[in-house]
Amino acid sequence: MQSNTTFYQILDFNGEGAFGKVATCVDLNTSETVAIKIHKGNEDEFIKREVAMLKAVSVLDPNKNNIVRFIDDFTYHGHFCLAFEMLDMSLWDLLKKRQWKPLNLNELRPVAHQLLVAFEALKSIGIMHTDLKPDNVMLVNHKDQPFKIKLIDFGLAAHSSKIEVGLMMQTAAYRAPEVNLGLPLSESVDMWSVGCILAFLPNKSVCLSSSS
């Protein structure tokens, strides 16, 4: 795969979703292993919005603020591709791997702190994530850095100044009440989702039941 700046060699495919596939690749210029999100559709406006949000968020230090590092965007054989640093697994995948054993307080505390740091940083640049859930919180390297996390997936992120009353957002189980009630929206909707995750991880139950 070729971008404007480098070549990527595909090593494996390690995930698939409604958007397309995620490939594990190596940057042949730097030898860095990266994750490339390969969109299967031609949703130009959606992809442009995601890239714009990723570039806006890139002004933040990804390591200090616990946010995935965005590397590159390019088109390959008609598919739009986004390259990111390679991360380990999501909090959801971790729980599955642990056979749904809840996190204890010592495990939960660093996750809570890092999420709050991430969302404080996003608020400082006027960005709302609007889609926080365990799938969108990734462990960096659980073996070498236990419970070091990063926030991913800015496909539904938006400038807080452009969020309108009545706009539907967030996965239902992590959705703030003001979204459902059609009330004014702010960064507090992300804080609600943080609270839902912190309730879910030690208890294995969501704040509000949902089929979504």
Image: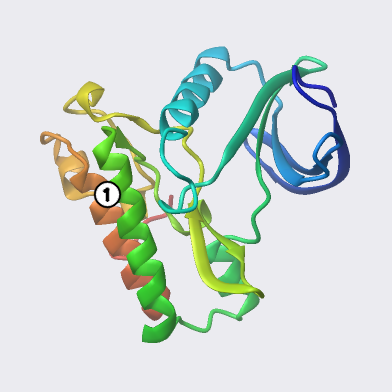
Residue at figure coordinates x 47%, y 34% from the top left: 58
**Residue 71 pos. (x, y %):** 63, 34
Q: Amino acid at mark 1?
A: Glu
Q: Specify how the rendered protein is coloured.
A: rainbow
Please count the marks in the image: 1
Question: Could you tell me residue 106's position as x and y percent?
Answer: 40, 85
Q: Position of residue 187 (x, y in %)?
A: 22, 42
- Which residue is at the far left? 183
At numbered mark 1, what does the secondary structure look like: helix, strand or loop?
helix
Around disc 1, counting alpha carbons within 10 Å, would you say few (fewer than 14), some (14 to 19), or many (20 or more)?
some
88 sits to left or right of 66: right
Indicate left or right for 186 with 95 as reference.
Answer: left
Q: Which residue corresponds to the image point at 77% horizontal and 21% vertical from the top-left? A: 3
| Residue 63 vertical placement versus 2 (above, below) | below
Q: Which residue is mark 1?
A: 120
Q: Quadrant for the N terminus, please.
A: top right
Whether residue 97 is situated above or below residue 101 in the rendered picture: above
Tell me what residue is drawn at x 42 percent, y 33 percent.
59
Q: Nearer the viewer, residue 210 or 139?
A: 139
Residue 87 drawn at (x, y percent): 64, 55
